[in-house]
Image (cartoon, grey):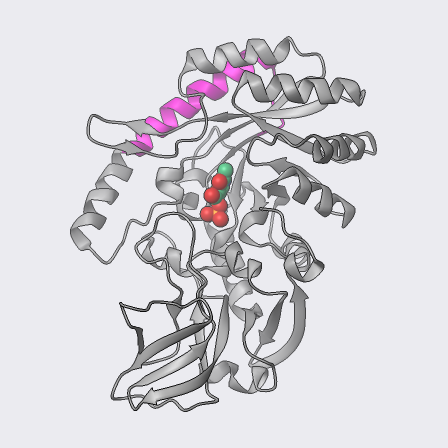
Amino acid sequence: MKKYKRAFETLERPFAWLDLDALDANIATLSLQTKDKRVRIATKSVRSVEVLRYLEEHVPYMCGYMTYSAAETDYLAQQGLNHFLIGYPVYETESVRNLCKWIKKGKDITFMIDALAQAGWLHQIAKEQEVKVNVCIDLNLSIKTPIVYFGTRRSSITTIDDASLLIDQLQAMSSLEIVGVMGYEAQLAGVQNQPKNKAKGLMIQQLQQQTKEKVTKLRQQMVALVKQKVGDLQFVNGGGTGSLAFTANSKEVTEVTIGSGFYAPSIFDFHKSVKLESAAGFALRVTRKPTSDTIVCHGGGYIASGISEQREPTILSAGLTYYPTEGAGEVQTPLKVSTKEHYEIGDTVYFRHVKAGELCEHFKALHLVRSEKYKGAFNTYRGDGQCFL
Ligand SMILES: Cc1ncc(COP(=O)(O)O)c(C=O)c1O
């Protein structure tokens, strides 16, 4: 990691970085895939107001944010951002009351719904606050075969009948207005289809190919139904970093979501369709060298949530591997050094997080580098004193 050495020489370790050249390259690569579809930025995969502002300025056809909680959306509204689709159902009274107040002041905020219980509750708060609230119906595009369940277990709207009933229920609630539909094809966007195990990769790719037709058919049918019952929609949202090529070619979709693709964490190293540059990561200090082939880094246990081939951070510096019996440790991480490399106490080891936004939960700032020069820092949510989920 010689290219970062001079830029970050004097920073205390550990620190997190954002490489602006790589970020710009990723924006360009992703834009080629999204073509003329509008782009919604998934804030969970960014978690820094300053980076969100940078993306708003630089991402072509950027139309708004997909946020992940009501409190977070409230915070972003306070920061002057606008056009929010909360990507997941929320159920927190105080934060939602605050969002109703923002709606009264003219902010564009849409809530995600897939069940009567969420809708009824939201309707009551909207009524109490005397405001009309926009909602988006979350379709479940998972595919069930006798052998596998391929997709997410989130939304309860899996059939045309489910969607039809929910629309009728929503239309009976005078404080709610259906303005959008989301059909997130997670089995294409979020599943690693080029894992280290080649046979597994081929099987996943085959399943993905089969699923595409079904996803398109189901999403088109559902969107047609909603439009027939509701009239014109403001948006039909789909996709994520791993499915852009497919989603951007889907006629029924008006906007695609991108989050992780900007930082390009290591989970996307195992995606066939995405070739991005590693733009963010963290650095640790070597503080011990108990044997000639072992170094110990101070920190490092930033384990990724969810399921992936590898949940420990990916080591970027050369010639280093985890000890399987130790892994990435809570406050110390021993690493095995190959015979070709040499590390001393005081050196720095560079890593990437497996997930994008989770990196920012461990650091107050992302230190910026461009053309090997230090360019200051952007605060993360944590640096702003915020912690949402
Ligand atoms: C509803 C929804 N849309 C889109 C995405 C895609 O986000 P990313 O580009 O970070 O993979 C996600 C990620 O989990 C999601 O939950």
Q: Position of residue 240 (x, y in %)?
A: 46, 44
The magenta span reads: 211-235
- Left or right? Give the position of 101 relative to 86: right
Say above or below: 241 vs 262. Answer: above
Total number of numbered labels? 0
Residue 224 lies in magenta, yes or no? yes
Q: Quadrant of residue 381?
A: bottom right
Residue 280 lies in magenta, yes or no? no
Looking at the image, which is closer to me, 214 or 96? 96
Instruction: Indicate the quadrant containing the N terminus: top left, top right, bottom left or bottom right.
Output: bottom left
- Left or right? Give the position of 23 relative to 54: left
Q: Position of residue 195 (x, y in %)?
A: 26, 55
Q: Quadrant of residue 376?
A: bottom right
Q: Position of residue 125 (x, y in %)?
A: 72, 22
Q: Main secondary structure of the magenta part?
A: helix
Residue displayed at 53% across by 14% down: 166
**Can residue 189 be seen here?**
yes
- Left or right? Give the position of 236 relative to 379: left
